[in-house]
Amino acid sequence: MRHGAHPHPACYAPDARCAVLWPLDPICSLKRMPMHIHFCNPDIAEHPTGGNRYNAALRTAWPSNDTCTTGTAWPEAPAEADAWLVDSLLLRDDGLLEAWATGPPAVLTAHYLHLADPTQHDTPAAQEEADRLSLFGGYVAPSHFVKEQLSAHSIAPRRVVVGPPGLDHTFRTGRDAAGTALDPPAHLLSVANRFPNKQLIPCLHMLEDLRAVPWQWHVIGDETLDPGHAAAFREAVAASPVSDRVHVQGAASAQEVRAAYARADVVLCPSRFETSGMVAREALAAGVPVLGFRVGGLPETLGTLSDACLVPAGDFAVLRTRLHEVLTTPRLHTQLAWQAVRVSRGTPCWAETAWRIRQFVQQVAV
């Protein structure tokens, strides 16, 4: 914006703590009216997945003059609501078609779609999702990457709003003012639920080849959604020659995760696919470099850090080399940490994301 220009205040999210102000034209031209919004969540809503955390934060930040309800079963979804916000895990749910026939306009929150995942886009699940996309009046994409994938399935861009995960102000720890220091052993951190897609076992094997460098790896994440894979990961750690350097923890509170970021020197995100990367956003805000693969929406999240921190998908050899460079070059680590904070300043707060999505939902509902 040019110096001295003053946007119309109605076009911006009304929260003084927000780091970014987004113009909402032409959506903001609608006269705002109180609405009843129902959040249709999956039955695993209590688990700390990225989608569930997004839904909960969005619901908390939603403008207070609207009526918001939440349910995890289609019979609970009120037909009298002005709109439903439907989690994408429910897209293939058997009750969707019957509920859709009598319900209000529905907006799909596309946290994860098989059809957007390059490793799953040709599966029967992806085809079933594609067949049902037309049921919705609008779509919330957590990244421009997801919006592009929806466009590839004939969804008009005007029917999609990009609502990236917001950032709670408590994650902005002020580490940029204090600077960072890389003292051995380096503290590596991964915040990932135990799913094969997170590639924690291959990451463990990668770290075994870095035994000459002093490090400790702390892994935090839910172990109940896929208990078989969680057990396999713990068994791999127990059998590893670096088992004494790996600390495995189950699901943790937000306060514990923030404390883990504060201790971390590098956050490892070796996922096979991410639609956006909430963990990466939080790590950057704490001034922690994020290393991972160039997949999905992660390059968008890392912005100008992408070339330095992301490597070709699935190439653990290159990721190991990059990690070795960062851990053995203190100056490089410090530069990446400062850049992380600068990139994070472009992340919206949750009030902004909620405001933008709310305006879009009103446009769909009227």
Image (cartoon, helix red, strand yellow):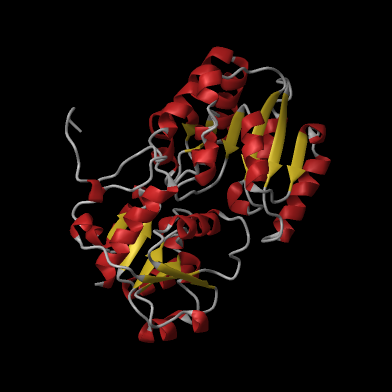
Residue 31, by quadrant, is: bottom left
- The residue depicted at 48 percent of the width and 69 percent of the height is 125
Decide which of 296, 168 is in the foreground and name it. 168
Indicate the position of residue 259 as horizontal and vertical percent values: 66, 36
Q: Is residue 289 above or below residue 128?
A: above
**Residue 312 shows up from this direction:** yes
* Side (left or right) of 15 relative to 1: right
* Side (left or right) of 300 relative to 53: left
Q: How many marks?
A: 0
Decide which of 107, 333 is in the foreground and name it. 107
- The residue depicted at 33 percent of the width and 48 percent of the height is 13
**Residue 94 shows up from this direction:** no
* Quadrant in which the C terminus appears: bottom left
Indicate the position of residue 185 as horizontal and vertical percent values: 72, 22
* Quadrant in which the N terminus appears: top left
Q: Is residue 32 above or below residue 144?
A: below
Indicate the position of residue 123 as horizontal and vertical percent values: 47, 65
